[in-house]
Amino acid sequence: MTRQTVSLKKQFEVFDNSLRYRIHNLLPQLMEETGYDMWIILCREYNEDPVFTTMIPSLCLTARRLSCLVFVKQGDHFGAYNFGRPDERLATVYTQAYTDIKKDQMEELSAFVRKWNPQKIGINCSATFALCDGLSKELYDKLSAALDEQDRAKLCSAAPLAIRWIEARTEEELSRYRTIYGLAMDICEEAFSRSVIVPGVTTTTEVEEWIAQEINRLGLRFWFSPHVDVQRQGLEGLGSCGEIIRHGDLLHYDVGICYFGLCSDSQRLGYVLREGETEVPQELQQGFARTSRFQDIVAQEHLTGRTGNEILKYSLDRAKEEGIEASLYCHPIGFFGHSAGTVVGLWDMQNGIGAYGDVPLHKNTCYALELNTQSNIAMWGGQKVRFCAEETVAFTEDGVLTYLYPGRDKIYAI
């Protein structure tokens, strides 16, 4: 199968145009929504703040010595400033505010803050989300020492703003996500075919390696190692790490790629047909239908303003009422695979996840709708089988959880 990606030049162009729009159109709204009139992001080369990496053009790649971005939103004024060393690529997005590199950078930053006299200065520190905790102790100390006392007292966690910046998707990004996810699914559909899998010969590891190689051939990267496992009658648990794939096996893959600056995440199932079989056995289809039903329940429970913990509880309660043995562990996705935002359960925490699950659901955000159900399969001697599913989805302006690619309700016949 021939598939290709657009040129790097085009990818960089799309990302950089999107970045400029996000900084100068989306970010002012988010600062007003969350109540910050200044946001300072400080980091050093090779110890980049995760948020910083989402705010620089494609070919900037890293911080430079001491990098500093400052955002100001006061009344009708919005400014995005580079308070690090001048950089021609940053200049396409930011106004250069540190203009004399012979002067002490932190002293100049302090004077800049005093000039604007903000009421609430956000810095990236968070006890809950690692992505929002990128300010190092050393740089915090330097910033605190440099600021005047009245400005030092205004420093506070920017986590609410950082989460909104990371999770919010523009209309263009939502449209782009369909292309990204379509490519990821195209790769995985070929992986679950006889062109890749020879029953009795091919191992789960070899399918993983094929997926990884194809992603690499396209010039892309995966944000976690592709994973393939197998369930079969008499096999305890999940077979992976080199298990030879046989006729009658139920296969499961978990794959996430990065393209155009955004991540995908998907899990689907495949069944290796036995000689004479033309479709997936009915009992396995029925077991998987419970997973599809649970997906529908979870999608319905995604309502604007609900927290992840609330969605988790309502979804699991409904599943229990319908006799479905279910687990739920959805996560935000976007610039990062396991992103910041509304987290709905963890695989080993099904009774709520504390503050990590207390972020309310906002429109125009994207998620990995990740879950499973378990059923006893009579044709396998009553063995319990886990039916996993994961789809990259968008929670759109109409308040509906939207799937980005068809086929979520089927097991691939291999």
Image (tube, rainbow, N blue to C red):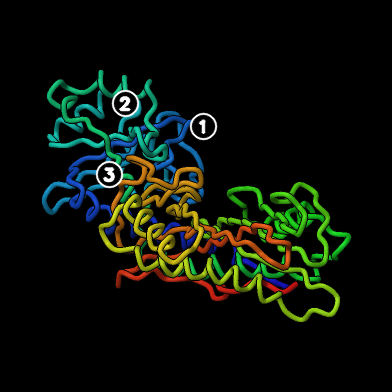
Residue that appears at 54% across and 58% down: 372
Residue that appears at 75% across and 70% down: 193
Q: Position of residue 161 (x, y in %)?
A: 28, 45
How far apart are the alpha carbons under marks 2 and 3? 27 Å
Asked whether 202 or 318 is in front, the reply is: 318
Front disc: 1 or 2: 1
Residue that appears at 52% across and 56% down: 263
Direction from residue 357 to residue 289 in the image, left or right: right
Residue, disc 2: 105
Asked whether 379 or 173 is in front, the reply is: 379
Mark 2 burial class by Cα count in 10 Å: few <14, some 14-19, many 20+: some
Quarter of the image for residue 321 reads: bottom left
Residue, disc 1: 46
- Pointer 1 or 2: first along the chain: 1
Q: Position of residue 403 (x, y in %)?
A: 46, 71
Q: Position of residue 191 (x, y in %)?
A: 72, 65
Front disc: 1 or 3: 3
Residue, disc 3: 160
339 over 172 or under it: above or below = above
13 over 41 or under it: above or below = below
Name the element at disc 3: helix
- Pointer 1 or 3: first along the chain: 1
Which amino acid, by three-letter code, is at mark 3?
Pro
How far apart are the alpha carbons under marks 1 and 3? 25 Å
Mark 3 burial class by Cα count in 10 Å: few <14, some 14-19, many 20+: many
